[in-house]
Image: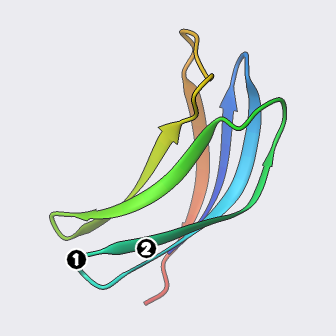
Amino acid sequence: IEYTIFASHTSSGIQSQKVLIMDNGSTAYSNEFAVMFSSSLLVSFSADVNGGNVRLIATKESGISGTSTITYKFSKTIIN
């Protein structure tokens, strides 16, 4: 799976990147690359397998606070 992700936070800037994920049915392996951001890094990404489904997980970076949420836009390509 390949994700191209754009994230924005009203007070902390924007971020764009790619994430590759592969899995063997029980474990997911992920790699973040081509990470670009303004101001500060907003989120990091990982992956897992839950109930047979591969999930992309976004974790907010420390220092990213406030009541505003992070908004995501993404494209997903699945290679079978």
Task: Label 1: state its secondary structure.
Answer: loop
Label 1 is placed on what type of residue?
Ser
- Which image quarter: residue 20? bottom right
Considering every residue shown, the one lying at the far left of the view is 51
The furthest residue to the bottom: 80
Q: Is residue 45 above or below residue 18?
A: above
**For residue 17, which quarter of the picture?**
bottom right
Q: Nearer the viewer, residue 60 or 8?
A: 60
Please tell me how crowded label 1 is: few (under 14), some (14-19), or many (20+) other residues with Cα within 10 Å: few
Residue 1 against residue 36 in the figure, above or below: below
Q: Which residue is mark 1?
A: 26
In the shown orientation, is residue 53 left or right of residue 15?
left
Q: Which residue is mark 2?
A: 29
Taking the image as shown, residue 52 lies to the left or right of residue 24, namely left
Q: Position of residue 32 (x, y in %)?
A: 62, 63
Please tell me which residue is depicted at 58% across the width and 16% down the height of the picture. Answer: 65
State the colouring used for the structure image.
Answer: rainbow
| Residue 43 locus on image (x, y percent) | 59, 40
